[in-house]
Image (tube, grey):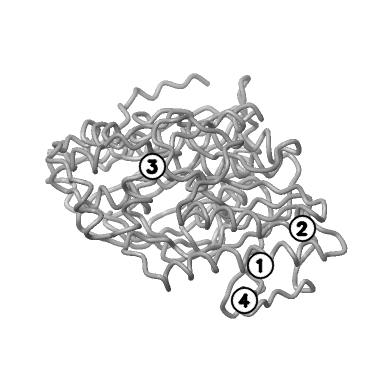
Amino acid sequence: MNRQPGSFVYKSQYPCSAEDLYLYHSRPGALERLLPPWEKTTIISKQGTISPGSRVKLKMYAGPFPFHFHAHHIEDQPGKMFRDIQEKGPFSSWSHTHYFQNTEKGSLLEDRIEYTLPGHRYLPSFVTNHIKKKLTSIFQQRQRTLSADITLHQRCSQTPLKILITGASGVLGKALIPLLTTGGHTVWTLVRRHPDPERNEIFWDPETGILNQLDLPELDGVIHLAGEYIGLNRWTTASKQRVLESRTRGTELLARTLASLKTPPKVLLSASAVGYYGNCRDRLIDEMVPSGKDFISTVCEQWERAAGPASQAGIRTVFLRMGVSMTPRDGALHRILSTSPLGFMRYFGSGKQYISWISSDDLISAMLHALTTPDLQGPVNITAPKPVTNRELMRVLAKITGRPLLFPIPGHLFQMMYGQMAREIILAGCCVSSKKLQDSGFTFRHPDLETTLKNLLGAVDLKPNKVQK
């Protein structure tokens, strides 16, 4: 039996000062950045950051069972430590203290957790062992993310920027903003509802052409991500028109407004996609290849063309031709995982179609890199260096999750259900080169599929936590 309250200590080193490490944790977005991607944790509300009196309410899961965890920050010594405790949650008590200390190689972070489980005097020891194993997995993931974020910010965030973002409520925008704010950048967002000035929100309406340039602050850069979700449904004439117009109208309005400013931003990053190239099968292609003839290719080509007023006004314009973003929180990977609880389809159609993918962390990191790399402009493929086939993707997923590979799904079944969408999205392939991005100095956190999926799904082998002060 386990008759003692539990304790957990995790020590990790970082290539920065203790003061800078503390500062990262004190900025908005730190909690969002450090939540493990495989956990279905949702932030319900936040008040403050880490100063005493700050509070955060989380919805978490133990297997399929949800529970709430409310944390209250009670102590803070800037540059040295801060502490939060559980106000409501599954533990009888919980206290988490972060200690920051300078070392010869940078800084040391010691996370110390003290907790008591309900009925802990009568619980078998394997319960505490399970909790410690789970905490080790979470904190090793935190260490990987924090180390990579700090290295990125040391290169790209030495000068705080004022940044405007569209599409901030989407999955990509929600991931990008915490990365920017933990680097010390200030973010404004364009919204289509009544704006909250205290949250740096500015109203716009692309459908009616409303964007008052007097509402905009002086900006260093703009990241344009807005556009209607293409979805995995059968396309209709009306839905295709909405997809096209949601991209071209917003982009043209934004580019024209930025170009007319007395002091325009230095850079505009405008979203696009590798769908620009159409179905290229197994041919490795770069940014010099012209657009394809598919509907998606037409959308991407007109989407990029709509940003013309910005580039014509001398604003450095980068077209982010993004691959498939890998995250278990949404998108293609989320759909595959959630619809395949017993096993994965062996492949779709021929299974030979290439997927140009990228981890969600590399995707948003590439955006910050593009924002702060003056020589980078024009179209840039934002994809991992090693595209994979549909067969390979499903094989690696099965290996990592331990789920079996089942029968393949013939392509004609997809075409019967989804028509043109299936031909252009599910059954088409694109093998895209990321050489231009790499040559500009970008380094991938997750260059190959297997290590990426292990990291995203919490399947990384646990290592002993041995850190010398």
Rendered location of residue 429, percent (x, y): 38, 40
Residue plotted at (15% across, 36% down): 405
Q: Quadrant of residue 441?
A: top right
Q: Is residue 241 left or right of residue 269?
A: left
Q: Earlier in the sequence, mark 1 or mark 3?
A: 3
> Could you give the CA–CA distance between mark 2 and mark 3, rounded to whole angstroms?
42 Å
> Where does label 2 land, which residue?
219
Residue 231 position (above or below residue 107):
below
Residue plotted at (66% across, 30% down): 440
| Category of crowding for the residue at label 2, using alpha-carbon neighbours closer than 10 angstroms: few (below 14), some (14–19), many (at least 20) | some
Q: Earlier in the sequence, mark 2 or mark 1?
A: 1
Q: Amino acid at mark 2?
A: Leu
Q: Element at badge 3?
A: strand
> Could you give the CA–CA distance between mark 3 and mark 4, rounded to whole angstroms?
47 Å
Q: Amino acid at mark 1?
A: Asn
Rendered location of residue 70, percent (x, y): 38, 61
> Could you give the CA–CA distance between mark 2 and mark 4, rounded to whole angstroms?
20 Å
Q: Element at badge 2?
A: loop
> Where does label 3 land, which residue?
113
Q: Amino acid at mark 4?
A: Asp
> Could you give the CA–CA distance between mark 1 and mark 4, rounded to whole angstroms?
17 Å
Mark 1 or 4, which is nearer the eye? 4
| Category of crowding for the residue at label 4, using alpha-carbon neighbours closer than 10 angstroms: few (below 14), some (14–19), many (at least 20) | some
> Where does label 4 land, which residue?
205
Farthest-out residue, right = 262
Q: Which mark is residue 393?
A: none
Q: Element at badge 1?
A: loop
> Where does label 1 land, which residue?
200
Q: Earlier in the sequence, mark 2 or mark 4?
A: 4
Q: Earlier in the sequence, mark 3 or mark 4?
A: 3
Q: Earlier in the sequence, mark 2 or mark 3?
A: 3
